Image: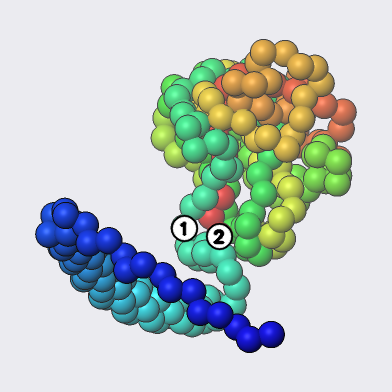
Amino acid sequence: MAGRQIDRPPLPIRADGDEHESQTRRSIEQFMESAAGMVADVDEDVATNTADIATNVTNIATNVTDIGTNDGRLDTLEAAVDAVGGPHVMPAAGRWYRHCAEASGSSAGAATTEDRMYLIPFMPNEDVTMTELGFRVTSAGAGSSTARVGLYSDSGRMVPNAVLAESGDIAVDSTGVKTATGFSVSLSAGSIYWFAVATQGGTPTLRSMTSGQFLPLGHSDATNALFDAATYAYVTLGASWTALPDPAGAITAWGTGQHPIVVMKV
């Protein structure tokens, strides 16, 4: 069957053709303006990001320099540590050291109790050799009053044990620092030791700790004093004692007040 051709009438010509063309042009111009604005925004963002990248690169370079500087300092520190043989500050030979309580601990004079041996724990952080012991009298005792100062080992259970060093009788009828010499006692880092001092024939005032705690010592009960007072131990001696007891013996009480300061020379 032969096909047939359909004749279509021509499209009508719109009377508003000029106005339609004008609207199209305006739409195109608006689109171009919008596109130009977006391109400008992108260019601005690219410029900002480029500046940020440059700043970050500069910061990274600075940090790399700082790391290099710190590495150099670390190398210097490690060399110094190697030179002294360990990671701790070595005690200086010929200097005096005392037991360490809290950093906030303070001291003042406090009267002693006659025939009472005060025991104060401490822990050296390096192996040292103790050569002298000392304490300070701030108010003299009676004319015949004396004191003895010493050093005890620990039992391994936070209790003083055996005498490691002991002075002879030291007169405390005058003020000032009193020392005992002639010792050579090796002390091990990380071990507990106990300073000891006892008076007889009077009650001199000794320089004492008024606050601070030796926290590992423990306490027999959870009193308020445990949390804010100095902690030490004491043993009551007989009236006729002539030497520090060896071993220390049973603790009379765990004190929660002032206790004498004993120092050692290494």
Q: Are marks 1 and 2 in contact (CB under 8 Å)?
A: yes
Picture coordinates of residue 199 (x, y %)? 63, 26
Give the structural element (helix, strand or loop) at label 2: loop
Q: Residues within 10 Å of mark 1 (few under 14, many from 20)?
A: few
Which circle's residue, 1 or 2, is located before the other in the chain?
Answer: 1
Figure check: 113 above or below 263: above
Q: Is residue 239 left or right of residue 198?
A: right
Amino acid type assigned to the residue bearing label 2 in the image: Val
Q: Residues within 10 Å of mark 2 (few under 14, many from 20)?
A: many
Give the structural element (helix, strand or loop) at label 1: loop
Picture coordinates of residue 61 (x, y %)? 31, 79
Picture coordinates of residue 142 (x, y %)? 52, 18
Q: Residue furthest top?
A: 224
Please identify the quarter of the rendering in which residue 116 is found.
Answer: top right
Please identify the quarter of the rendering in which residue 201 is found.
Answer: top right
Asked whether residue 143 appears in the rendered view, the answer is: no
Figure check: 139 above or below 179: above
Q: Disc 2 designates what residue? A: 266
Figure check: 69 above or below 129: below
Figure check: 92 above or below 243: below
Alpha carbons under labels 1 and 2: distance apart? 6 Å
Question: What residue do we see at 59% from left, 21% from top?
Answer: 228
Please identify the quarter of the rendering in which residue 53 is found.
Answer: bottom left
Q: Front-most of 249 and 125?
A: 125
| Colouring | rainbow
Amino acid type assigned to the residue bearing label 1 in the image: Arg
| Mark number displayed over residue 203 | none
Picture coordinates of residue 6 (x, y %)? 49, 74
Question: What residue do we see at 56% from left, 80% from top?
Answer: 4
Q: Is residue 5 left or right of residue 41?
A: right
| Mark number displayed over residue 95 | 1
